[in-house]
Image (spheres, rainbow, N blue to C red):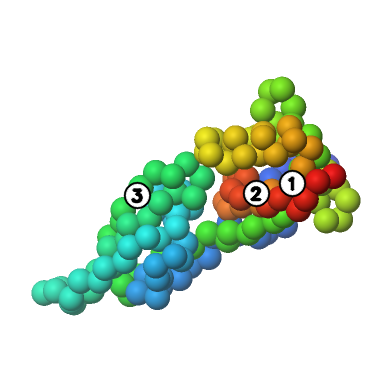
Amino acid sequence: MSDEDNHFESKADAGASKTFPQQAGTIRKNGYIVIKARPCKVVEVSTSKTGKHGHAKCHFVAIDIFNGKKLEDIVPSSHNCDVPHVTRTDFQLIDISEDGFVSLLADNGNTKDDLRLPSDEQLLTQIKDGFGEGKDLVVTVMSAMGEEQICALKDIGPK
């Protein structure tokens, strides 16, 4: 057996998980939860009483943080649910290309060019108008479970 027989393809991202487990009974309104493999923000939680078989149930109504779809899930309150790691990062807007991609500048000086303009019409027009007027814009990028999207905009004055 030589060392050349072992071929491993590494597809991991430093072993960091996209989600972490949390007991369903401890998840509150405005928290995050994974429903149908989508990261969601909880808008309503109701807990039913323990039934004949002994488990209280939590009924979650949540909205997908990337596409805005409403999702629901019912989980026994003692069971674990997946909660996504949601991060928000601020970037300065450098450029908007014709094909709908943006160039962003991070705090450390690196550029990020792989992000599309948001699908939210109001935010989209605010970004395009502000950029067209030559304002210095800072966009907030929300990322969870390998997806990223521009979710907010701040105007820090003219260039």
Distance between mark 2 and mark 3 Cα atoms? 26 Å
Q: Residue 119 location in percent, x, y?
A: 54, 35
Q: Which residue is mark 1?
A: 137
Across and down, in percent, residue 12 comes to 68, 51
Q: Regarding mark 2 in the picture, which secondary structure is present there?
A: strand
Tag 1: amino acid = Leu
Tell me which residue sits at (27%, 63%) in the image: 59
Q: Which mark is residue 68?
A: none
Where disc 1 sits, the SS reads: strand
Which callout, 2 or 1, points at the residue further toward the start of the chain?
1
> In this rendering, is residue 5 above or below 14?
above
Of residues 135 and 13, the one nearer the viewer is: 135
Going by the picture, which residue comes out furthest to the left? 52
Residue at position x 18%, y 76% in the image:
49
**What's the residue type where badge 3 is placed?**
Leu
Q: Residues within 10 Å of mark 3 (few under 14, many from 20)?
A: some
Q: Circle 1: is it few (<14), some (14-19), or many (20+) Cα within 10 Å? A: some
Residue under the image location 46 percent in, 66 percent down: 31
Q: Earlier in the sequence, mark 1 or mark 3?
A: 3
User: Which callout, 1 or 3, points to the residue nearer the camera?
Assistant: 1
How many angstroms separate mark 2 from mark 1 (CA)? 7 Å
In the rendered view of the protein, which quadrant contains the C terminus?
Answer: top right
> At label 2, which amino acid type do we have?
Leu
Label 2 crowd bin: few (<14), some (14–19), many (20+), radius 10 Å: many
Q: Residue at x 63, y 59 (%)?
A: 87
Q: For marks 2 and 3, give the one nearer the viewer.
A: 2
Give the mark, 2 or 3, whose residue is nearer the N terminus: 3
- As drawn, is 96 to the left or to the right of 52? right
Circle 2/circle 1 CB separation < 8 Å: yes
Q: Is residue 64 visible?
A: yes
Q: Which residue is mark 3?
A: 71
Q: What residue sits right under mark 2 in the picture?
A: 153
